[in-house]
């Protein structure tokens, strides 16, 4: 007696699937075999965008190349040779020595003044912007929207528009022709405050602050041990902006200072350049160009030193959702 074998639709589907995944040799191949991936398509190049970026690079580096090349020339070679070509004599080291020794080393004195204005002014502006921006971002109080509107309005006002009123105010206080006439206005940085404010909203999670408070940490300890590290990229950005703004500040020292002993490098080099005009002109363009080259070196060093702190995502993984 033979028994009939019934085949259900499910069994038939499984057998068909096995037949499709079994190669001709009879060896079963897993159904989840990895298919060969096609090579990733190369990113398309935008020729117009490449040309525009190349023009920006040339526009940025040609002035630096001109400055570096002409700093190696003598006073005579500056007017008898091509601007982007080297002169007949390589006088870079001679120009550097003359720059540092001209008029009893007044260039070094101006360099020290500029460092003073940058360290106290830019450093103080960064500190105040960090404290104020963090407080506005993480503490709720009445009038915060009004403060926000005032900060935005202060950003829209150019610094040159406030130079003359500041001069009149400082002249009444007897602070003109003193370092405080440069340092005090440099301490105010509305843009730095706004940048720290917007950065602290997302960079410092509120859950981390609440956890620190539950552990008994004070607000100052929480700020210096937790928040300050998370705000490092924003603080470095504000510091770089403040350093560059203070280092390149020209108009404010020009109207505030009349004593050359308190000049920064920008005003001092401008006075050297002005010696080429008028009665008894004494052109020293080779020293002006060499001094300009030496002036940008500290800014380049500052960028190279601070860029390692320019990181993001320091708070990634600190809060588990």
Image (cartoon, rainbow, N blue to C red):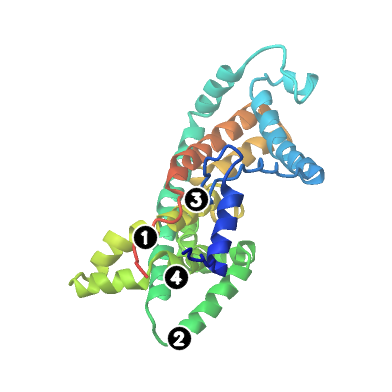
- C-alpha span from label 2 to label 3: 30 Å
Q: State the image coordinates of residue 18 (x, y, percent, origin top left).
A: 55, 52
Q: Nearer the viewer, mark 2 or mark 1?
A: 1
Q: Is residue 144 left or right of residue 210?
A: right
Tell me, yes or no, if residue 287 can be seen here: yes
Label 4 or label 2, whichever comes before in sequence order: 2
- C-alpha span from label 1 to label 3: 28 Å
Label 1 or label 3, whichever comes before in sequence order: 3
Circle 4 Cα neighbour tier, 10 Å, few/some/many (<14 / 14–19 / ≥20): some
Circle 2 Cα neighbour tier, 10 Å, few/some/many (<14 / 14–19 / ≥20): few
Residue placed under numbered mark 4 in the picture: 201
Q: Nearer the viewer, mark 1 or mark 4?
A: 1
Is residue 290 shown above or below 230?
A: above
Give the residue at the far bottom of this rendering. 142
Is residue 221 shown above or below 47?
A: below
Residue placed under numbered mark 3 in the picture: 240
Q: State the image coordinates of residue 160 (x, y, percent, origin top left).
A: 63, 62
Label 2 or label 3, whichever comes before in sequence order: 2
- C-alpha span from label 3 to label 4: 21 Å
Q: Is residue 75 left or right of residue 98?
A: right
Viewer-nearest residue: 15 or 287? 15
Residue placed under numbered mark 2 in the picture: 143
Secondary structure, mark 4, is helix
Residue placed under numbered mark 1 in the picture: 317
Res 277 quadrant in image:
top right
- C-alpha span from label 4 to label 2: 18 Å
Viewer-nearest residue: 215 or 227? 215
């Amino acid at each position: 007696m033979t028994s009939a074998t019934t085949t259900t639709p499910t069994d038939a589907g499984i057998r068909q699937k096995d037949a499709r995944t079994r190669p001709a040799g009879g060896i079963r191949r897993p159904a989840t075999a990895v298919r060969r991936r096609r090579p990733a398509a190369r990113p398309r190049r935008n020729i117009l965008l490449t040309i525009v970026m190349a023009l920006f690079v040339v526009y940025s580096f040609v002035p630096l190349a001109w400055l570096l090349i002409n700093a190696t020339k003598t006073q005579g070679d500056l007017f008898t040779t091509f601007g982007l070509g080297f002169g007949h004599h390589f006088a870079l080291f001679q120009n550097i020595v003359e720059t540092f020794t001209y008029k009893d080393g007044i260039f070094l004195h101006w360099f020290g003044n500029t460092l003073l204005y940058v360290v106290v002014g830019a450093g103080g502006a960064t500190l105040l912007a960090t404290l104020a921006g963090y407080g506005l971002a993480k503490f709720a109080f009445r009038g915060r929207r009004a403060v926000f509107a005032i900060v935005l309005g202060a950003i829209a006002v150019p610094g040159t528009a406030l130079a003359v009123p500041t001069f009149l105010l400082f002249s009444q206080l007897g602070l003109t022709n003193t370092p405080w006439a440069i340092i005090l206005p440099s301490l105010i940085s509305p843009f730095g405050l706004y940048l720290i404010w917007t950065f602290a909203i997302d960079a410092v999670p509120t859950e981390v602050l609440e956890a620190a408070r539950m552990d008994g940490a004070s607000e100052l300890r929480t700020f210096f041990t937790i928040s300050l590290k998370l705000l490092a990229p924003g603080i470095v950005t504000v510091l770089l902006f403040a350093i560059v703004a203070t280092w390149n500040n020209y108009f404010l020292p020009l109207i505030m200072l009349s004593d050359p002993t308190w000049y920064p490098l920008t005003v001092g080099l401008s006075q050297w350049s002005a010696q080429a005009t008028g009665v008894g002109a004494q052109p020293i363009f080779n020293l002006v160009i060499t001094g300009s080259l030496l002036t940008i070196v500290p800014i380049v060093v500052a960028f190279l030193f601070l860029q390692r702190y320019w990181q993001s995502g320091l708070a990634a993984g600190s809060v588990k959702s």
